[in-house]
Image (cartoon, rainbow, N blue to C red):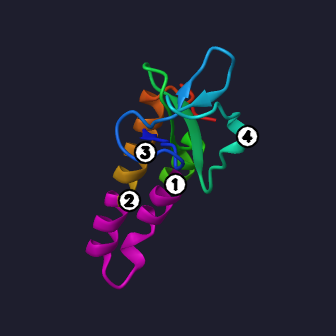
Amino acid sequence: MHALTCATCSTGPGTEFRALPDGLFACPPAIPSPVHDIDLDGPDAWAIDASGILGYVTDPHHALDAIGEVLADLSEAHELPNPEYATTSSLRNVMNAFSEYTAAFLAGAAPVSVR
């Protein structure tokens, strides 16, 4: 999980956004902010770790889709001019996507079943 830090305060330990009992998030020295004030770009999903730190992980559905695409590419690797390279590249990509899915799962953002 990648922790979201407060840009107003500074970077480093202690400036991570943390969950508050009222559903807002704040770093310790800053004013609380609602989640909708924080915008995530790309295929990311929110996550909150056990200590209440707000962060993000790759959206688990995006990671599963990437795994499916890579496996489809892998099945066609033998048709490419350099099948060994294509196979190695596909295996590396599927491992990266699986790693992203695992990180989302460990952060509690991933579904247990595949959609």
Using the numbered discs, state the Cα–Cα distance from disc 3 to disc 2 in whole angstroms.
11 Å
The part of the chain drawn in magenta is: 68-92
Task: Kindly state the secondary structure of the residue where label 1 is placed.
Answer: helix
Q: Main secondary structure of the magenta part?
A: helix
CB contact under 8 Å: marks 3 and 1: yes
Using the numbered discs, state the Cα–Cα distance from disc 3 to disc 1 in whole angstroms.
10 Å
Query: Earlier along the polypeptide chain: callout 4 or callout 3?
Result: 4
Query: Earlier along the polypeptide chain: callout 3 or callout 1?
Result: 1
The disc at residue 83 is none
- The residue to which callout 3 is attached is 100
Q: Amino acid at mark 2?
A: Asn
CB contact under 8 Å: marks 2 and 1: yes
Name of the residue lying farthest toward the bottom = 81
Q: Amino acid at mark 1?
A: Ala
Q: Is residue 81 magenta?
A: yes
Q: Amino acid at mark 3?
A: Glu
The residue that appears at 39% across and 80% down in the rendered structure is: 80
